[in-house]
Each structure stands twice: as structure tokens, then as C-alpha cells.
Amino acid sequence: MSIKNNINLLQRELSEKKCKLIAVSKTQPTEKIMEAYTAGQRIFGENKAKELERKWNELPKDIEWHMVGHLQTNKVKYIASFVSLIHSVDSQKLLEEINKQGNKANRVIPCLLQVRIASEDSKYGLKYEELLTLLETVNDYPFVKVTGLMGMATLTEDESIIREEFTQLKQYFDDLKSKKFSKNIEMKELSMGMSADYTIAVELGSTMVRVGTAIFGDRIKK
Ligand SMILES: *Cc1c(COP(=O)(O)O)cnc(C)c1O
């Protein structure tokens, strides 16, 4: 299957469910990204700040760039002026730095808070209690807008585990939606689902899926 075909099929499948496609293009060369672009894809995701900055410089300016991977505080400065959404905010320190860089760039930076739902402890993300604590402080960061949550399920063949974890995240999302927070918090996006599990995620209420290999094929190993 070609990149164009993959994009077209995914777009069709997801638009019925009102779910957005983030094409995760990390490690992929410009030509492959342009193939997806030509097929109509406009939202791309990366997991390294420097690579994201380089691709933003090289590629068409109507692309929406999302940061989907773990972000170190000292790298926020590379992407603050243009990034459309940071999916992976998982600490007060990071939120503070995004606010600082947003202020410098004179723009409000949209962010998702990353929640830990997977059982393996290698995964990044906030526990529910930490999430609540962090949400209480968002009012102090006027150059940040929190627009929802992100989570990654355990890497497993066992679909029941994935279902359980996504259901948990959707539950958190719905609970927070009905709560009153500061005006720079609006719970509208739920970023869950990757190549291996996006179908389950969409069924369970995802509004954004982050799909890499199912579009571009295997990543170049470094
Ligand atoms: C790489 C990556 C993806 C895409 O993974 P695929 O399995 O290639 O679809 C999604 N989300 C994050 C955070 C990633 O780092």
C-alpha cells in the first residue's frame, strides 16, 4: 500500500467518527512527508524538538505541527513559536517553561496533559491525583491553554488490557469535562490510539489518533 492510499483510507474511516488524524512522521524523510501532504494530510506529529523545528522550516507553511513525544524543558524554545499542539505535558516544570516560551513568542500554546494509563512503569504521564493537582495551577499560566488529555496504552497483544486502559482515560476525560476550572482549560480533545490500537481508541471515544507506521511503514532505525 502507498502512503497516499493509507492516508485516504484512514481519513475516510476517521472522518465518519469525527476523529482527527495526526500523521506521526518522526524519522521519516521530507519526500515521504510530502507524499502524505499531497494526499491531503495537514497535521503531522514528531517526538523530537530539533527534528520538528527542522521539518517546520523545510516543509509547507500550512502544515499543523504537533509535538507528541516526551518533551524536555530545555527544548521547548525550539518549537514555541509555531507548534500547534503539545500532546505530552506531564509536569509542572514543563508547563511553566511552555508558559515562559509562549510569553516570549507572544502566543498562547495549546497543550494536552499526558495521563499514565499503561501498567508498565516506563511510560511517562501523570497519575490521576497529579493531574488534578496540575489542573489547579493552570490558571497561573496565561500563555498556555489546556485543551484535553493524552494517553498511551500498554504495548500488548491483549486487547482487553488496551480496552480497559482507554476506557479509564475516557472516564477521566468525561469527569473533568463536567468540572469547573480556570478559563484557559477546555476539555475537548482526547488523544489516544496509535497504529496498533487506534481502532479500539476511536470506538472508545478518541478525538485524535497518532498514527505513524500504519501510514509510512517502518521507521528508519538509528
Ligand atoms: C511514535 C509515536 C506514535 C506513533 O506510533 P506508531 O506505532 O508508529 O503508529 C504515537 N504516539 C507517540 C507519542 C509516539 O512517540
Image: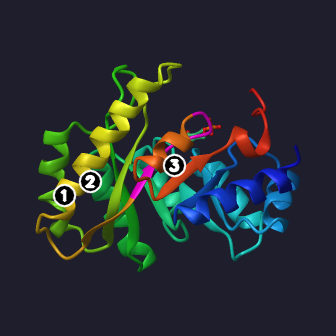
> CA separation, marks 3 and 1?
22 Å
Going 23% across and 48% down the picture, which residue do you hit?
Answer: 172
Q: Secondary structure at mark 2?
A: helix
| Residue 176 badge | 1
Kind of residue indicated by mark 3:
Val
In screen coordinates, is 167 left or right of 59?
left
Residues tagged 3 and 2 counted as in contact (Cβ below 8 A) = no
Q: Is mark 1 within 8 Å of ligand 1?
A: no
Q: Earlier in the sequence, mark 3 or mark 1?
A: 3
Residues tagged 1 and 2 counted as in contact (Cβ below 8 A) = yes
Ligand 1, image quadrant it occupies: top right
| Residue 173 badge | 2
Q: Secondary structure at mark 1?
A: helix
Q: Position of residue 30 (x, y in %)?
A: 83, 54
Q: Position of residue 3 (x, y in %)?
A: 83, 50
Please tell me in which quadrant of the rendered image residue 144 appears: bottom left
Going 71% across and 38% down the picture, which residue do you hit?
Answer: 213
Q: Which residue is mark 3?
A: 68
Going 84% across and 61% down the picture, which residue do you hit?
Answer: 34
Q: Secondary structure at mark 3?
A: loop
Relative height, residue 104 to residue 193 (above, below)? below
Res 122 visible = yes
